């Protein structure tokens, strides 16, 4: 441990790691570059935005049998959002990184230069990279700039410093190729983790997160849309990409001020079953509905609604409402492994490929933890198994996997305390295919309940006549059944991939 006085303000600054290159004075924000046994002030470091992360400097935990402590942080912003990289110091003096992006965490350790890495410009989501016999898939590509930092760090970095990184995944494994210093990247290897896995201590409490998140204090904030003046409710630093529910204008509030990113034509608020600001109690945690968007399959008209919920204690959660039913959706930290061209396996459970399609955003309102806009589109592949539906969503910059599990409307009603208002469609939903999900936008698949109902009527009327000895009645009944069910089965078995 190396202590000295800040040359700018005189406050004590501590270097806990012998390998740390810089430290940020917590009092005057001076960035101090270590040179032998002295330091040089190389400028001011912007304050990191206090966000929803439960991690802070002094948080401790265990990884791979070794104790560590958090000693520094840099905050990186890219086109669609921002994330934190926490610098951790192990008891044996080695360092590592704890990545913190929208409640998804990974620890990686420096494994040296990657001489076999592809050029950054040639990497695409889903592309393969082999390291130590393991084939990883490219999960996302980001060019980001540093917007703030604190504590001590292993290299010199300041506001405006640019990072170019490609993240790869394989099951729970996590690998980053960092091209920030040039065309030959450094390789960082580790795995996706949860804070519970790390046995973290000295985390921020949920009420502390709510009090301190963002430049605007408080659990929730309300501001006026800079385009039309309508009120927008949001949680500072939790989800700072805002969509006005009245006019659709897209704004950015990641810096504490609101700037219009894209003006939109004025349009009426789209009615939805759940509303922005609704509160739910799910699995013992209090969630608030902070954002919603309407999506549809490319080329189709029937849409579904995706609701983004946030809890200071449990993070982000999605609820998806389709014509058939409700699904609770969680973005996965550990990816499924490919078994064949048509099947994957997650934690020992098999999932079979069912359908592939394109989805696009047609309406968005509220606040999101990444930049979403009308017209955004992704390619989705659904896999179904006994545990629910696995979905792979691919965009030009990233791939995400999520697990959707069917939830009765009555359960959702109870979560939100709607007093039975969400159960009106329960009978129709019960007739729908229990395996259907948000991809069930095909109108022919929705004919199944009607086919069942009319088949029952047809049998009720024609069976007594058929037993009177008329072969003609049997033929008419059979033809009627074929006419009823042909549209349903052609819709179900059509290959939409």
Image: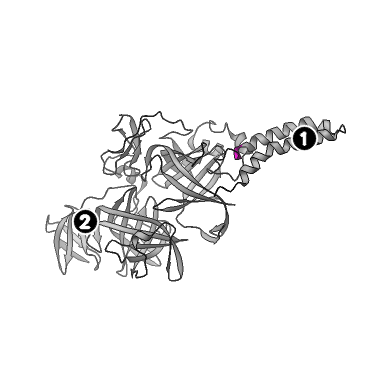
What's the colour scheme?
Answer: one colour
Place of residue 62 in the rendered image (x, y in percent of width and height, measured from the top left): 38, 63
Using the rendered image of the protein, determine whether residue 284 is visible from the camera's viewpoint.
no
Query: Is disc 1 in contact with disc 2, using a CB cutoff of under 8 Å?
Result: no
Stretch of the chain drawn in magenta:
442-446
- Relative to the observer, which residue lies in front, 454 or 203? 454
- Relative to the observer, which residue lies in front, 113 or 149? 113
Q: Who's the residue at 58% across and 48% down the image?
A: 495
Place of residue 17 in the rendered image (x, y in percent of width and height, measured from the top left): 25, 66
Q: What label sits on residue 38 in the rendered view?
A: none
Q: Is residue 251 magenta?
A: no
- Residue that numbered label 1 is attached to: 477
Left or right: 242 as drawn, with respect to 339: left
Q: Who's the residue at 29% across and 41% down the image?
A: 253
Residue 250 position (above or below residue 392): above
Magenta span main SS? loop
Place of residue 10 in the rendered image (x, y in percent of width and height, measured from the top left): 12, 57
Give the Cα separation between the discs numbered 1 and 2.
Answer: 78 Å
Q: Please identify the residue farthest to the right as the structure is shown.
A: 469
- Residue that numbered label 2 is attached to: 158
Place of residue 208 in the rendered image (x, y in percent of width and height, measured from the top left): 32, 46
- Which of the 4 image quarters holds residue 491? top right
Q: Residues within 10 Å of mark 2 (few under 14, many from 20)?
A: many
Nearest to viewer (mark 1 / mark 2): 1
- Relative to the observer, which residue lies in front, 272 or 439? 439
Quadrant including the N terminus? bottom left
Q: Earlier in the sequence, mark 1 or mark 2?
A: 2
Residue 359 position (above or below residue 112): above
- Relative to the observer, which residue lies in front, 393 or 199? 393
Q: How crowded is mark 1: few (under 14 residues within 10 Å), some or many (20 or more)?
A: some
């Amino acid at each position: 441990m190396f202590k000295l006085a800040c040359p700018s303000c005189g406050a004590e600054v501590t270097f806990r790691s012998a390998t740390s290159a810089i430290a940020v004075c917590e009092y005057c924000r001076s960035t101090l570059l270590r040179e032998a046994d002295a330091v040089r002030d190389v400028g001011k470091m912007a304050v990191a935005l206090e966000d929803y992360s439960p991690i802070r400097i002094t948080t401790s935990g265990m990884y791979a049998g070794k104790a560590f402590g958090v000693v520094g942080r840099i905050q990186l912003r890219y086109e669609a959002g921002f994330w934190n990289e926490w610098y951790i110091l192990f008891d044996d003096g080695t360092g590592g990184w704890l990545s913190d992006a929208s409640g998804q965490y990974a620890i990686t350790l420096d494994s040296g230069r990657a001489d076999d890495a592809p050029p950054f410009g040639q990497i695409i989501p889903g592309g393969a990279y082999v390291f130590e016999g393991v084939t990883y898939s490219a999960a996302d590509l980001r060019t980001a700039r540093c917007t703030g930092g604190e504590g001590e760090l292993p290299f010199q970095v300041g506001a405006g410093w640019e990072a170019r990184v490609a993240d790869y995944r394989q099951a729970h494994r996590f690998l980053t190729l960092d091209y920030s210093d040039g065309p030959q990247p450094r390789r960082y290897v580790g795995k996706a983790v949860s804070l519970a896995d790390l046995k973290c201590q000295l985390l921020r409490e949920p009420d502390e997160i709510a009090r301190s998140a963002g430049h605007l204090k408080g659990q929730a904030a309300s501001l006026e849309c800079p385009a039309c003046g309508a009120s927008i409710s949001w949680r500072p630093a939790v989800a700072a990409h805002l969509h006005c529910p009245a006019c659709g204008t897209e704004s950015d509030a990641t810096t504490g001020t609101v700037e219009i990113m894209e003006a939109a034509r004025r349009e009426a608020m789209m009615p939805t079953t759940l509303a922005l600001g609704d509160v739910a109690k799910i699995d013992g945690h209090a969630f608030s509905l902070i954002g919603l968007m309407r999506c549809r399959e490319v080329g189709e008209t029937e849409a579904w609604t995706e609701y983004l919920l946030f809890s200071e204690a449990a993070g982000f959660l999605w609820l998806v409402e389709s014509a058939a039913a409700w699904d609770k959706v969680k973005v996965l930290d550990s990816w499924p492994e490919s078994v064949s061209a048509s099947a994957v396996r997650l934690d020992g459970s098999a999932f079979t490929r069912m359908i592939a399609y394109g989805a696009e955003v047609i309406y968005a309102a509220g606040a999101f933890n990444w930049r979403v806009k009308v017209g955004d589109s992704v390619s989705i592949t659904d896999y179904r198994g006994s545990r629910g539906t696995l979905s792979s969503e691919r965009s030009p910059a990233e791939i995400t996997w999520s697990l959707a599990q069917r939830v009765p409307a009555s359960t959702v009603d109870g979560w939100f305390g709607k007093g039975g208002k969400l159960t009106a469609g329960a009978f129709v939903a019960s007739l729908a295919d229990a395996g259907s999900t948000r991809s069930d936008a095909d109108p022919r698949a929705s004919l199944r309940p009607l086919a069942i109902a009319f088949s029952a009527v047809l049998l009720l009327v024609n069976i007594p006549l058929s037993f009177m000895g008329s072969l003609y009645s049997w033929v008419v009944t059979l033809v009627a059944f074929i006419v009823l069910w042909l549209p349903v089965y052609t819709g179900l078995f059509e290959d939409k991939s």
